[in-house]
Amino acid sequence: MRLSRYFMPILKENPKEAEIVSHRLMLRAGMIRQQSQGIYSWLPLGKRILDKVNRIIREEQDRSGAIELLMPTLQSAELWQESGRYDDYGKEMLRIKDRQERPLLYGPTNEEMITDIFRSYIKSYKNLPLNLYHIQLKFRDEIRPRFGTMRSREFLMKDAYSFDLTQQDAIHSYNKMFVAYLRTFARLGLRAIPMRADTGPIGGNHSHEFIILAETGESEVFSHKDFVNFEIPSEDTDFDDIAGLQAIFDKWTSLYAATSEMHDAAAFDAIPESDRLSARGIEVGHIFYFGTKYSEPMGAKVQGPDGKEHPVHMGSYGIGPTRLVPAIIEASHDENGIIWPASVAPFDVVVINMKPGDEACDRLSENLYAGLGKADKDVLYDDTDDRAGTKFATADLIGVPVQVIIGPRSAANGEVEVKDRKTGAREVMTLEAAMNRLAG
Amino acid sequence: MRLSRYFMPILKENPKEAEIVSHRLMLRAGMIRQQSQGIYSWLPLGKRILDKVNRIIREEQDRSGAIELLMPTLQSAELWQESGRYDDYGKEMLRIKDRQERPLLYGPTNEEMITDIFRSYIKSYKNLPLNLYHIQLKFRDEIRPRFGTMRSREFLMKDAYSFDLTQQDAIHSYNKMFVAYLRTFARLGLRAIPMRADTGPIGGNHSHEFIILAETGESEVFSHKDFVNFEIPSEDTDFDDIAGLQAIFDKWTSLYAATSEMHDAAAFDAIPESDRLSARGIEVGHIFYFGTKYSEPMGAKVQGPDGKEHPVHMGSYGIGPTRLVPAIIEASHDENGIIWPASVAPFDVVVINMKPGDEACDRLSENLYAGLGKADKDVLYDDTDDRAGTKFATADLIGVPVQVIIGPRSAANGEVEVKDRKTGAREVMTLEAAMNRLAG
């Protein structure tokens, strides 16, 4: 992408409304724009990152055996009356009347609709287990949306729903998502710690929040610090291996970890002081097993091997991509801007032509841009007439992992400077050497 | 994908509510499910097709130089008051009040919002031309939604918006989209004819509908039949070549083509009778140049080379992916079901194991499934215990281009049968030969 033809509106000043660093940097880098309170556009740079986050989420959902569909944003009120949540949900639910005065709502979540889909088609345990997910917009009319897309009203959510004949089977489905989430967050460059979460009236110990540590986190969290070094399940994990997944779950829940709501001070104090980790955290995922809470009232039943009908055991599993993007920034930035993990970087490389119009600068820049493009790299080519200082500041701000700086003096010798955004390390090398290193 | 683990709820009976063939086939193949009037879920098979359609649309938008972003579904009423359309739009606009009683609406289109984004950031002609697009849900509260996703209330739209300093530049932007649309529909396996459309009070001759011919089309269309053989612009088309694009536009608008609204019977009758094409059509795209209609009232101005401020010349360009899917089916099916063009087929190949449990059937089927997967083919593997007739009917219904049938007798000889869904041609060959043919 040639920057001269791109739409990446960089803000020079720090926007006043931004209270946290990720919100500030997303606005400054031209990633998002607020359209109404808590409602955002994702500008082209932000959209690229969001797509990469979604792709990783999808790959790990698919790997675990979950199947993607797409439910609509608007739902009929009737469905929610069946489950009993229509009245419970309160003002966070955006209620709408259509031209026929029929009550609709903008889905804040999809348990009811997916249960309705399930009961319409699935009648036998032979079609289980089943896990269906979608990545779709939700709306929650928060009284105080804030922190940009970290807590917005219209937001994107990946929500998966599992269906099983028995509680035991449902625990295996739960463990699949538990492992998929560990892998997802790790691939996004995050270290997420699963923490036991409040399950409310349903009970059981099968609800976990995945929390990443960040100074600006909304909740206080307490955990054993060994979690930071736990091994992430490999991409060869066999999701059908019931005992294997259970072992991963057991290991990742063997040490103390809790949000303030679930905190047990005595248990935490029993950990040697040097192993205690007390910090602030951002919730980036939440998984639940909730048994027959929806299948029972909504009549989602299957015939079991015993010939009788059984309400299915369900779980739901949420990740918010539009919240993950700022969460990644909270975890990875410096005073000059964002530092994207390679897996979600909007571009792999930014090629900075220091003097467009200079024959050598243009030639080397164009060659590198074309060559890396052929090698399937996403390249941003800064071919603008901006001052050197502006170009450097922009490249640092938007956080592309590798910068290649092409100035007239070194270009005349066929050389370019390669800079690592994270470490700041710079190295001068020939164009060929740069191409070989970066095209790999 | 193993069918035994997939969610593809096939209906055996023809659903009564479906009036047209695409709606019937989409329901029978388990592609969609109606959730409320005119509001649909895309079940996994449908979602796969929708994704492939979206990918082709994106590739052609990107190729033409348009830049993707993502605007939200909900918009503030204020924006629409600025353009004057808030009151004009009538009951098709879904109007909402949030918990603070602020008026919102579910966007039926995005001219206002994109103009607002533009005016917030772009101040100089040096940043033009610019074309921004998104693929996002829209809602239009049609009084009579029908024909499944062909005319639904919540639907997906790709809408692009171009910004130029002058009318002349805007015509070039218009031509870019004109060519991108020709390429997009051709890649989707459709022959779309651009027809001059009513531009309403704006005037000018720069609005075209892209119409495909189908018996169930909502509108009557009249055209010269040579359009059917016109050459589609190649993927090497230079979108910066002003004269080149104009020549393509001129050629594709040189012959008579009009919907009934714009029909000129005298002009049509002047065509030799053997060259006249009178048929029914489905609108699959619509492009407009509308000058300063929004930029003027909303103050979207740039400084020109003359140092003065000029309202920008705009165009908008829409394609409905959720309507394209049924349109493709209308154009490509037979009495047994859907016949997907390869470019949008949900799977490239379906491997039908006629006798799971039979050693040779299982071995050949698994080998082929694994081998084609390694070659990056999307394969559906029918490993179910269904009867032969059910398996064949399902494969035909869902329209995967190639079927590989693996029965016990031929499998014992290391042979499989390859069937072309479209022609019905069958050929027996060794597993290796099938692999070589299909993995390419």
Image (cartoon, coloured by chain):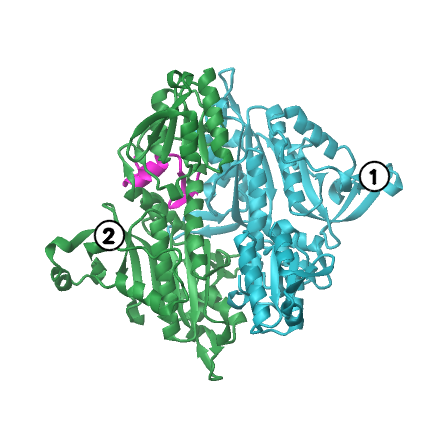
Chain colours: A cyan, B green
Spot the residue most to the front.
Answer: A413
Report the chain holding disc 1.
A
Crowd rating for badge 2 (residues with CA inside 10 Å; few <14, some 14–19, many 20+):
few
Crowd rating for badge 1 (residues with CA inside 10 Å; few <14, some 14–19, many 20+):
many
For this view, does B430 lie left or right of residue A152? left
| Labelled pair 1, 2 in contact (Cβ < 8 Å) | no
Q: Which amino acid does label 1 sit on?
A: Phe
Q: Is residue A161 visible?
A: yes
The image shows residue B306 at horizontal and vertical percentages of 46, 84
- In the displayed structure, A415 sits above or below B141; it is below
The image shows residue A355 at horizontal and vertical percentages of 60, 72
> Is residue A436 or residue A42 the one in the foreground?
A436
For this view, does A188 lie left or right of residue B222? right
> Is residue A430 or residue A160 the one in the foreground?
A430
The image shows residue A23 at horizontal and vertical percentages of 65, 60
Residue extent of the magenta highlight: B16-43
Picture disc at residue A268? 1
To which quarter of the image does residue B311 belong? bottom left
> Is residue B3 or residue A250 the one in the foreground?
B3
Whole-Å distance between the Cαs marked 1 and 2? 75 Å
Q: What element carries label 1?
A: helix
Q: Do labels 1 and 2 share a chain?
A: no
To which quarter of the image does residue A131 belong? top right
Q: Is residue A436 magenta?
A: no
Residue position marked by numbered label 2 in the rendering: B228
Residue found at x 41% / y 34%: B438
- In the displayed structure, A193 sits above or below B372; it is below
Residue found at x 88% / y 42%: A273
